[in-house]
Image: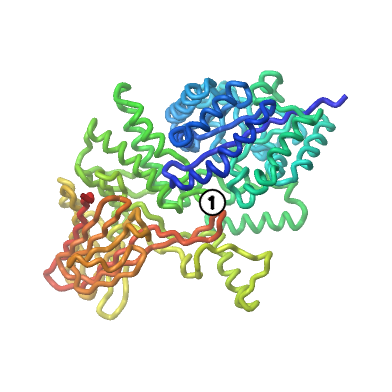
C-alpha cells in the first residue's frame, strides 16, 4: 500500500516599510483577503503563513475583520504561523542582538494576536549565512525553510530532500526544510488537476513530503494570476483535489517536524535563490555570469551543474552600490548607539525605529529589490534619523566628528547641529553625501547615481532590432517599457550624485572637475570645515558650515579665471509629482521639479515640497546661472523598464572675478 505524501504548504507575505497605501490595499483585495477567504472553506487543508510584522500591523489597523478570520482559522488548528524579523530584515545583515529582538518582536505579536508562538521562521530573500543559526536558536526558533538549491550547493543527495536536515553553529542546532523548486514552479501555474496528479506521482515513488513555501503574491498579484487563481478557481480546485486524494495529506510543519527524525547533519554555503546570485553582480561580471549560464543551458548541462555555477552573495549589494553601503553602515552606527543605552532607555518606540530602518527592501536591487525606489529609501532614512535625533537628546554628539563610517578607505566629516546635519566625504570632492533636516527626519542627500546594469543591454538590443526590422521587434525579444527610454538615459555617472561638486571651466574652454580638495587645517571647530584644491595655476578654497536652519558653502578662487560651477543633487520627496515646485524670488512659480528650469543672474531659488511639508531656499551672494534638471535613473522591474526620478540637480555657474567670494546657503523651513 502506498504511503500518502505530506504536502507542507506555506505562503509568505510582505510589503516594504513605507510602501504606498494604495499598493497595500490592492495587495490585500486581490491576494491576502481572497486567499484566506478560499482557505477558510476548507478547515482540513493545513498550511503555514508568514506575514512580516510591519505588514501585519498595517492590515490589523485597516482590515480588522480579516484578522479575526485569520485568528479563527488559527484557533481551529488550520494555520501555522512562521516568524522572522519583525520588519523583514535580511538577518545576516544586522547584528546578532538586533536579530534576536527582531525575531522576538514578531513572535510576541503572533502569540498575542493568534495565541501561537512560532517554532518555524521564514528567511528574508532566503539569504542563508551560518551566523544566523545562533540568533534563531536563541529566539526559540526550531526550524526554517530554505531553497533546495541551497542543499544542492552543498552537494546534498536530491533523493533526500523530502524532509528536514539539521545544521549547527557552535553547538546550537537548527533544522532546515528544503523548499522544492518543482513545487514553486508548478503552484499555481500548472492546471490544478495536473498539480495534484504530480503530487500523487511523488507519493508512488515513496517521497515523504513535498515542501512548498513561496510568495503569496503569486496567488493574485502577479500578472494574470488573479483571474487564474480566483476567477477560474485554481486554488479551490487544487485544495479540493488534494483533500480528495488518498495519496496526499496536509500537515503543519510543526506536526511533521514532531513526527519525523532528521535526515542528518548538513552545512549550507552562503547562498540565496539562484536569480539573486546574478543580481548581486556588477554589470561586467553579471554579463559574464549570464553568458556562462546560457552556454550551459544550450549544452544541456545547466540542470546538472547549476549548484556549482554560483554568482555573488547578497552582501555584494553593499560593495556594488555605495548608497546602499552608506545606509547600512549608518544603520549599524545608530544600532550601536541605541544598544549602548541603559536598558530603561531602550524603549519599545525607539527599538521600533531601529527595526524599521533595518527593513531589507531598500538595500538591494534586482527584479524586485527596492534600492532604485526613492520612497523605500526615504522610509529607511526617516526612521534612522528619527532614532538618531532621539539618541541625541539622551547622549549629545560633538559639533564635528571624523572617521571612516562606511569602510571605504576615506574619512567622513560629520557636522552636527540642532536642526541640520551634514556629512562631507574627505575624498577629493569634499562633497556633502548626507544632508539631514531633523525637523522632518529627511536626508536631502538620499539619491542614487546611474549605474551600469547588465539588463540595460536589452534597451540597445531592442532599439537596434526595431531599426533593422522597421520598428517591430521579434516576440522573443520583446521587452516592456513603461516610459520612453533611449540609451543615453542609462549612461552611467562618472561622478557621485552629491551636494556641492565643483567643476572649473578655463578661459580656453577646457573643463576640469575640482577633485583634489584637502582639509586646509583651519576652521575645524564650531560646525565648520575648510578645504583647498589646486586648480590650474591657482586654487579654490571651500568652507562648509552649519548654523541653525542654514547650511553655508563658501567658495573662493585665487589666481584663476574662467567659470566655476557647483552641482547640488537634492532628494525631494515629491519628485516629479504635482506637489513639488520651484518658486522664484519674485514669488512666481515657473514649473515643477520634473521640468527643466534655467535662470540667469539669479540669487535665490526656493524648492517647495508638499510631501515633505517643507521648503529649501537656495541663496547665492553672487548672481549665478542656475540650471535645474530632474535626475532620473533607468531600472527594470516586473512591470518593465522605467525611469525613476531620484533627485533635483541644480547646477550653479558664475564667472571667477579676483577678490570675490561666492557664498551659497541652503535654508530649510517647514511649511506652515
Secondary element type, mark 1: loop
Residue 328 found in image quarter = top left
Q: Nearer the viewer, residue 180 or 663?
A: 180
Residue 327 visible in the snapshot: yes
Q: Which residue is mark 1?
A: 366
Q: Is residue 603 above or below residue 127?
A: below
Horizontal arrangement in the rendering, residue 119 relative to residue 512 (left or right): right
Label total for image? 1
Give percent across and percent down for residue 569.
32, 59
Residue 524 visible in the snapshot: no
The 10 Å Cα crowd at callout 1, few under 14, some 14 to 19, many 20 or more, is: many
The residue at the far bottom in this view is 508
Give percent across and percent down for residue 188.
69, 43
The residue at the far top in this view is 259
Give percent across and percent down for residue 361.
48, 44
Colouring: rainbow
Residue drawn at point x = 22 percent, y = 67 percent: 588
Q: Nearer the viewer, residue 43 or 431?
A: 43
Horizontal arrangement in the rendering, residue 438 relative to residue 303 (left or right): left
Give percent across and percent down for residue 256.
69, 23
Instruction: Assign the N terminus to one quadrant of the image.
Output: top right
The residue at the far left in this view is 659
Residue drawn at point x = 33 percent, y = 31 percent: 350
Q: Is residue 642 above or below residue 523?
A: below
Residue drawn at point x = 67 percent, y = 35 percent: 212
Q: Nearer the viewer, residue 88 or 504?
A: 88
Horizontal arrangement in the rendering, residue 436 relative to residue 558 (left or right): right
Residue 214 found in image quarter = top right
Q: Nearer the viewer, residue 108 or 413?
A: 108
Amino acid at each position: 500500500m502506498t504511503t500518502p505524501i505530506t504536502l507542507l504548504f506555506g505562503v509568505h507575505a510582505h510589503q516594504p516599510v513605507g510602501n504606498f497605501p494604495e499598493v497595500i490595499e490592492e495587495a490585500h483585495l486581490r491576494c491576502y483577503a481572497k486567499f484566506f477567504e478560499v482557505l477558510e472553506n476548507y478547515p482540513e487543508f493545513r498550511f503555514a503563513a508568514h506575514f512580516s510584522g510591519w505588514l501585519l500591523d498595517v492590515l490589523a489597523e485597516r482590515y480588522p475583520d480579516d484578522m479575526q478570520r485569520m485568528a479563527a482559522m488559527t484557533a481551529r488548528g488550520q494555520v501555522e504561523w512562521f516568524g522572522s524579523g519583525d520588519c523583514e530584515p535580511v538577518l545576516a545583515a544586522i547584528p546578532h542582538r538586533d536579530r534576536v529582538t527582531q525575531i522576538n518582536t514578531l513572535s510576541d505579536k503572533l502569540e498575542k494576536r493568534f495565541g501561537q508562538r512560532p517554532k518555524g521562521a521564514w528567511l528574508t530573500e532566503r539569504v542563508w549565512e551560518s551566523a544566523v543559526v545562533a540568533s534563531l536558536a536563541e529566539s526559540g526558533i526550531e526550524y526554517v525553510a530554505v531553497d533546495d538549491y541551497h542543499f544542492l550547493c552543498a552537494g546534498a543527495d536530491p533523493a533526500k530532500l523530502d524532509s528536514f536536515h539539521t545544521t549547527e553553529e557552535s553547538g546550537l542546532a537548527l533544522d532546515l526544510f528544503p523548499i522544492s523548486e518543482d513545487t514553486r514552479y508548478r503552484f499555481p501555474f500548472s492546471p490544478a488537476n495536473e498539480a495534484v496528479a504530480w503530487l500523487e506521482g511523488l507519493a508512488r515513488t515513496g517521497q515523504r513530503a513535498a515542501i512548498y513555501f513561496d510568495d503569496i503574491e503569486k496567488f493574485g498579484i502577479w500578472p494574470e494570476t488573479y483571474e487564474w487563481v480566483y476567477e477560474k478557481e485554481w486554488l479551490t480546485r487544487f485544495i479540493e483535489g488534494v483533500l480528495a486524494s488518498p495519496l496526499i495529506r496536509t500537515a503543519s510543519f510543526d506536526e511533521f517536524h514532531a513526527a519525523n527524525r532528521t535526515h542528518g547533519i548538513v552545512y549550507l554555503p552562503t547562498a540565496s535563490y539562484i536569480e539573486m546570485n546574478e543580481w548581486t553582480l556588477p554589470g561586467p561580471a553579471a554579463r559574464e555570469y549570464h553568458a556562462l549560464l546560457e552556454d550551459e543551458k544550450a549544452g544541456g548541462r545547466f540542470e546538472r551543474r547549476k549548484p556549482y555555477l554560483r554568482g555573488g552573495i547578497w552582501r555584494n549589494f553593499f560593495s556594488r552600490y555605495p548608497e546602499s553601503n552608506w545606509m547600512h553602515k549608518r544603520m549599524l552606527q545608530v544600532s550601536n548607539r541605541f544598544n549602548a543605552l541603559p536598558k530603561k532607555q531602550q524603549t519599545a518606540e525607539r527599538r521600533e525605529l531601529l527595526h524599521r530602518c533595518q527593513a531589507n527592501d531598500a538595500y538591494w536591487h534586482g527584479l524586485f529589490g527596492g534600492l532604485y525606489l526613492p520612497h523605500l529609501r526615504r522610509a529607511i532614512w526617516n526612521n534612522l534619523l528619527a532614532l538618531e535625533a532621539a539618541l541625541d537628546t539622551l547622549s549629545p554628539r560633538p559639533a564635528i566628528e571624523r572617521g571612516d563610517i562606511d569602510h571605504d578607505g576615506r574619512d567622513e566629516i560629520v557636522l552636527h547641529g540642532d536642526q541640520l546635519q551634514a556629512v562631507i566625504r574627505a575624498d577629493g570632492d569634499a562633497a556633502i553625501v548626507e544632508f539631514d533636516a531633523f525637523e522632518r527626519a529627511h536626508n536631502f542627500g538620499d539619491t542614487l547615481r546611474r549605474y551600469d546594469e547588465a539588463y540595460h543591454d536589452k534597451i540597445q538590443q531592442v532599439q537596434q532590432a526595431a531599426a533593422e526590422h522597421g520598428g517591430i521587434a521579434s516576440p522573443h525579444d520583446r521587452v516592456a517599457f513603461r516610459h520612453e527610454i533611449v540609451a543615453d538615459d542609462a549612461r552611467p555617472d562618472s561622478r557621485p550624485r552629491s551636494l556641492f561638486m565643483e567643476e572649473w571651466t578655463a578661459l580656453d574652454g577646457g573643463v576640469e572637475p575640482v577633485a583634489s580638495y584637502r582639509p586646509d587645517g583651519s576652521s575645524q571647530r564650531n560646525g565648520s570645515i575648510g578645504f583647498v584644491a589646486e586648480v590650474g595655476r591657482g586654487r579654490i578654497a571651500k568652507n562648509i558650515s552649519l548654523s541653525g536652519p542654514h547650511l553655508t558653502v563658501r567658495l573662493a578662487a585665487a589666481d584663476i579665471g574662467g567659470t566655476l560651477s557647483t552641482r547640488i543633487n537634492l532628494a525631494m520627496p515629491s519628485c516629479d509629482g504635482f506637489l513639488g515646485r520651484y518658486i522664484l524670488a519674485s514669488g512666481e512659480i515657473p514649473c515643477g521639479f520634473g521640468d527643466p528650469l534655467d535662470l540667469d543672474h539669479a540669487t535665490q531659488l526656493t524648492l517647495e515640497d508638499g510631501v515633505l511639508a517643507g521648503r529649501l531656499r537656495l541663496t547665492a551672494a553672487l548672481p549665478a546661472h542656475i540650471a535645474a534638471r530632474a535626475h532620473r535613473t533607468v531600472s527594470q522591474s516586473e512591470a518593465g523598464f522605467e525611469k525613476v526620478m531620484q533627485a533635483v540637480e541644480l547646477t550653479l555657474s558664475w564667472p571667477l572675478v579676483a577678490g570675490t567670494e561666492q557664498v551659497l546657503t541652503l535654508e530649510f523651513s517647514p511649511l506652515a
